Image: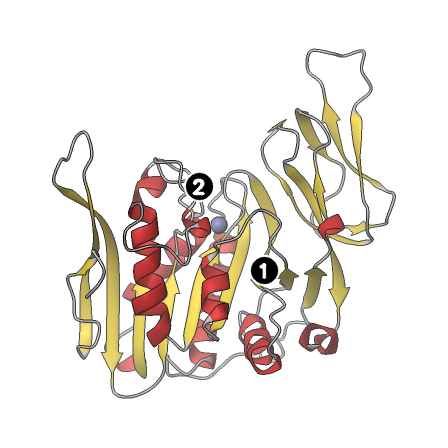
Amino acid sequence: MDTPVITTIDIDSPGRHFGLLRVPRSTNEGGWSSLDVPVASFINGTGPTALVMGGNHGDEPEGMIACYDLIHRIHLGDVRGRLIVIPCLSPDAARGNSRLWPSGANFNRSFPGSATGDTNEQLADYLSRYLIPIADTVVDMHAGGRSGVCLPWSEMHPVDDPDQRKRMVEAMLAWNSDWHFIYIDIAGSGLLAGEAERQGKTHVSTELRGGGTILRDSLDIARDGLMNVLRQQGVLRGEVATRASLGKPPPTILRAIDRADYLQAPESGYFEPLVALGERVNEGQRVGLIHFLERPDRTPEPIIAQTSGLACSHRAIFRTEQGDCVVVVGQPVTLEEALS
Ligand SMILES: [Zn+2]
């Protein structure tokens, strides 16, 4: 194989297996070492392949917990085909409760990666060339992390291909969350989602609240949504639940595909949200303030909504730098609009 990454399990071998993706590295305290990323595989008969991942960012525990829960909740007989679970893509970052790797690398800006690049790029390259290609469904769970707090939602990019978009909308809806979100990247490229989409996969992602929390209701949404999506994708046996079958009202699909939906701090200071998550926002409305601790005489700088919709995410750290995204406004759209 033309990759330095070693897999300690055969991901084609039937049964239930636990192992490691070993990415070689050499550090001050481990001259001959490897970054070990845990992986589990469940292969039972023929069927589709799902690749499920958490901990892409180390300070987003919701998806990691959902992965570990999934591994111990299901039996091999529940699987139809192949399920590969990588519960924590960024172990060192998770140990440090940090979004980024200790090297400063953002794993979710590392794709498609490089077999000869840094450790993060080597792992990304392995996913891009060996695991994503064999998957029909790719699930990469995120949350707001320490820096942001979101309504709990499943999400997708507005991909161009109508068939892929339809598959992704259906998978996004199968999360059965109250909220769904269609978004664009405003902070760089190289996302895992983009690589999976480029390969034509049915990609499902989430933002399951965040703000440095591990709230029970967010974890329930993560666990139940993941299980249902895997049933809907045909990888887990069992009846697919819908919001109607669960006695829930239709969800709200929010779309933020204009850069103006993503409001950034005009200068550094201390952020105060003026809107609650889910609250209606009108263009021109003050949705936040930047305070100046050393200047009580200074009027706080307002954050003004540039579009109308619902407040769907805001910054969760008081101290704010110029350019930080402080509030995101999403426009409610119909299912037909989401598909178009
Ligand atoms: Zn993330």
The spot of residue 54 in percent (x, y) is 39, 56
Residue 87 visible from this viewpoint: no
* Pointer 1 residue Cβ closer than 8 Å to ligand 1: no
Furthest residue in direction bottom, as rendered: 46
Question: Marks 2 and 1, Cα distance to the nearest angstrom?
Answer: 19 Å
Residue 231: quadrant of the picture: bottom left
Query: For the point 33% across and 76% down, which residue is it?
Result: 134
The reply to whether callout 2 and callout 1 are in contact (CB within 8 Å) is: no
From the top left corner, tell me how far across and down residue 189 is, in percent.
Answer: 52, 52
Residue sitting nearer the eye, 208 or 292: 292
Give the residue drawn at x 82%, y 20%.
Answer: 299
Which amino acid type is marked by label 1? Trp
- Which mark is first along the chain, 1 or 2? 2
Q: How is the image coloured?
A: secondary structure
Is residue 340 left or right of 42 when viewed as pictured?
right
Is residue 328 something that shows in the picture? yes
**Left or right of residue 8: residue 117:** right
Q: Is residue 339 above or below residue 307?
A: below
User: Of the residues tagged 2 and 1, which is closer to the observer?
Assistant: 2
Q: Can you give x and y, in whole percent of width and height, for residue 157 in the image? A: 59, 64
Please tell me the numbered disc located at residue 153: 1
Tell which of 222 and 247 is nearer to you. Answer: 222
Looking at the rendered structure, the number of numbered marks drawn on it comes to 2
**Residue lying at the far left of the rendered structure:** 32
Q: Amino acid at mark 2?
A: Arg
Residue visible at 60% across and 70% down in the picture: 159
104 to 62, vertically: above or below:
above
- Seen in the picture, residue 339 relative to 292 is either above or below; the reply is below
**Which quadrant of the rendered structure holds the C terminus?**
bottom right
Neighbours of disc 1 within 10 Å: few (<14), some (14-19), many (20+): many
Disc 2: residue Cβ within 8 A of ligand 1's nearest atom: yes
Q: Which residue is mark 2?
A: 99
